[in-house]
Amino acid sequence: MSGTITKVSGPLVVAEGLADANVSDVVRVGSQHLIGEILNMTGDKASIQVYEETSGLGPGAEVVTTGMPMSVELGPGMLDNIYDGIQRPLPEMRRISGDSISRGIDVPALNREKKWDFVPVARVGDKLAAGDVLGTVQETTAILHKIMVPHGLSGEVVRIESGEHTVTDVIAVLRDAKGVEHELTMIQRWPVRIARPYERKYVPSRPMNSGQRIIDTLFPIAKGGTAAVPGPFGSGKTVVQHQLAKWSDVDIVIYIGCGERGNEMTDVLMEFPELKDPRNGEPLMKRTVLIANTSDMPVAAREASIYTGITIAEYFRDMGYDVAVLADSTSRWAEALREMSGRLEEMPGEEGYPAYLASRLAQFYERAGVVECLGADERQGSVTAIGAVSPPGGDISEPVSQATMRIVKVFWALDSSLAYARHFPAINWLTSYSLYIDTLAPWYTESFGESYMKNRERAMHILQEESELQEIVRLVGQDALSPNDRLTMETAKMIREDFLQQNAFVDEDAYSSYRKQFRLLDMILHYDVLCREALEKKANMDALFAIDAREKIGRAKMADPNNFESVYDAIDAQMKQEIDAVIAGGEDA
């Protein structure tokens, strides 16, 4: 079915003669067959957002509907790949058209020529339902790709083929209850705006270990949780997301660069293929999918990239994997919504954003979670959604930040003053929060005992006290403080500099295991306890601050991850010995 263009306004095209088309249908626009999607219908008139540059289009050009909603291809070949916002493989497009991607290129998302070694799990005669595993493909060295029965199909396996096949080859035939035979390939197609189904959803109860101490200890995120990373320009949002992508204990990472600066996305594309997976030493790209849609690319595709990424994540979740979706940044995605809304002449909401901004954000974050997947083997998978927010001027009272805060349960507020002071990650411990603390507390207690959560609460209390004492210091100076208050300031400084601050360029400090984090914070707080006991016995405060063990605590975070326990034990013993010497008035103190 085809119609003709009556109006072109940037990425928005209005066409008439499409009475039988539906909202969300994909269309081909003009002689170059540009990809577009119908946003709304008024009679036989359709408003279409075009995912490519529309210069040269004019009234009278043909629009052809495909009759299918915007969908992605799911199957082997997605990992270790780079896509644009509508799942076109950028390396393949570059091979065809060179460095400047020409319009109208139609490249399949999955390689049609590469052969995969399909190993059947099901046998002829098995009764299978949607979500059951037909067989497996070793997609990369890190990930075993499970080929599942598509949603909406069930029946008896009539034929199943092992061996090497392309993604379009028939690998199995399923006969349904009506006797109709369905040929199955390794490809599934799924509409991006519809969440993939699951059996049931659970409350997230296990933390996602990021290796970043301020995140894991103070403001943890659960696997299957949601988080936002807001911050002004230059505060380190992208760096935080890079660290999460590299170190998080998830099986698969989906990194969506939706509208960020091209040079930042270039850094990602250049750096990620060189990064080594800390779990197996393989390239990190072997378990990563990159979606690149920079700020100079068509604005409509920026809006689609979020849905493309979360749909790919749900597909891997359905195999039983833990997946992290990193969106950088949802503010640029919201700006794309605002631009399209303005061109559609919709009633603007606050700051010109559409009135449905909050509901669209919720649709994205609500697709995160821990689920029991469809299928007989009771697989469990999770999608963790982490979105960067770039409020203009760092003002988090603007609509995107506020709408995000109402939805997500973890808020890592980046602070430009910390970034300028070279304190990274520049997460402000006074304005950030995590609502997963209560649900994760049983896991921490079971793994490390009661002291883990007690240490966290005590560290937070000391940092809060320091903030209040700094007001007094600014007014009357540090000398006016009591010895106990001066000790609080010193302990808080140790927590900030020796625990929270991390160096991504030093291997020993870039990542901290839970055990190392626990021992390091416990050692700092033990120093605080011993010093308070010494002050009660009239010990010299300056001598307490000058002991050799104090300096060793400052360097303790650089200890070898494989041998830190013995180092920390030695520092603990030396610290107690030296503080006892100060109490006794020993000359060596």
Image (cartoon, rainbow, N blue to C red):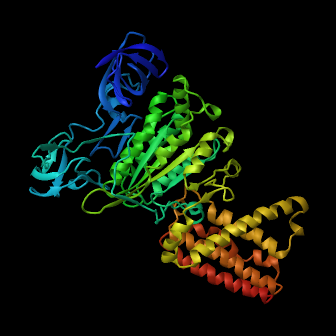
Residue at the spot 36% in from the left edge and 45% down from the top edge: 312
State the image coordinates of residue 548 (x, y, percent, origin top left): 70, 76
Whether residue 346 is situated above or below residue 3 in the rendered picture = below
Q: Compared to 302, does 214 lie above or below?
A: below
For residue 114, what is the image quadrant? top left
In this orientation, does residue 298 appear? yes
Q: Nearer the viewer, residue 381 or 289?
A: 381
Query: 327 or 165, which is in the foreground?
Result: 327
Tell me if I can see residue 260 in this picture: no
Q: Is residue 105 above or below residue 433?
A: above
Q: Which quarter of the rendered picture does the C terminus lie within? A: bottom right
Query: What is the residue that sits farthest to the top in this orientation?
Result: 60
- List the single residue furthest toward the bottom: 584
Q: Quadrant of residue 462?
A: bottom right
Residue at point 37% right, 39% down?
192
Q: Position of residue 81 (x, y in %)?
A: 35, 42
The residue furthest front is: 43
107 sits to left or right of 360: left
Q: How many marks are shown on the rendered structure?
A: 0
* Residue 135: x %, y % from top left: 19, 54
- Image quadrant holding the N terminus, namely top left
- On screen, residue 157 versus residue 461, left or right, reads left
Q: Residue at x 49, y 29 (%)?
A: 299
> For the point 71% across and 49% down, which residue is it?
417
